[in-house]
Image (cartoon, rainbow, N blue to C red):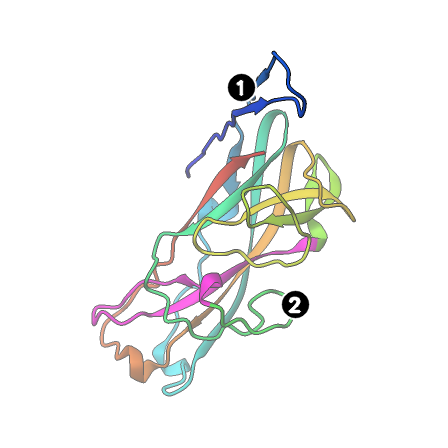
Amino acid sequence: MKKVVLASMLVMFVSSAFAADTAVLKVTGVLTNSSCTPEISGGGVVDYGTIHLSALNTTAINQLGQKDFSLSITCPALTKAGFSVSDDRTGTAPNIMVKDGAGNGNDIIQPLNMFGLNKNAGNVNIGNYTIFVKNDTITADGATVGAIYSADNGTSWSDNGTLMVNDGSQIVSVATVGSTAPVAFKNLVIPMAVSAAIQDTNTLAITDDTNMDGQATFTIKYL
């Protein structure tokens, strides 16, 4: 599991609107000894178990349903942080529809939200899955909080949505319910789920036991 510490330095030159003989240089930054640790329940494994081909549809997408897990982030001191997700099996999602793929009843088809389940022995993409936050049960230091999302590296935030994107460009953090300002925490628990679908067995043309092999990396982002 990767942990990434991000620090920022802003150098700004300001001059008066009037002719003057002075200028101001500001150099700012953050020094931190905070090192938060992410942990995924179940040892980081979401297991759909053994799926018999005879139980799968030969010509239609096979929906495997949802599996719950939780992401915990533990920090040594109050820290504003979030996380991003990147697909380690990029290019293997066939981008087939995942029913109820966001936990709100909506079917998901957007490629940016699809994580791949790798390929079979015939080099066929097996299927894909979505990852989403279960918004109503998130806690920070024991208090209920809400998930917030940023697509511009933390410049702006929204509390609209649940889905993870697969390229690491989205930061997910938490805020007081009804707010979109990130809050500091020491212990954060975010219940999440995956929802998976695999291709029809005619397309897969499987003759031997085949492992679904999805993998995604969660990376800590300091705010």
Instruction: Tell me where residue 106 appears, x and y as whole percent.
Output: 61, 72
The Cα atoms of the two marked residues, 1 and 2, are separated by 39 Å
Query: Which residue is label 2 attached to?
Result: 104
Relative to residue 75, is residue 33 depicted above or below? above
Q: Of the numbered discs in the image, which one, if any, rests on residue 203?
A: none
Q: Which of the two residues, 210 or 80, is positioned nearer the viewer here?
A: 80
Q: Closer to the N terminus: mark 1 or mark 2?
A: 1
Neighbour class for label 1 at 10 Å: few (<14), some, many (≥20)?
A: few
Residue positioned 52% across, 37% down in the render = 221
**Looking at this view, is 167 or 2 the one in front?**
167
Where's residue 191, x and y in %? 62, 51
- Give the farthest residue toward the bottom: 59
Horizontal and vertical percent for residue 1? Answer: 42, 39
Name the residue rendered at 41%, 67% in the picture. 128
Q: What amino acid type should be assigned to the residue bearing mark 2?
A: Asn
Asked which quadrant contains residue 188, the reply is top right
Q: Decide which of 8, 117 is in the foreground and name it.
A: 8
Q: Nearer the viewer, residue 188 or 47?
A: 188
- The magenta stretch spans residue 42: no
Instruction: Say which quadrant the C terminus sits in.
Output: top right
Residue at image x 61%, y 11%? Answer: 21
Disc 1, SS? loop
Q: Which residue is mark 1?
A: 33
Neighbourhood count class around disc 2 (C-alpha, 10 Å): few under 14, some 14–19, many 20 upward: few
Q: Quadrant of residue 26?
A: top right
What is the magenta range? 111-135
Indicate the amino acid at tag 1.
Asn
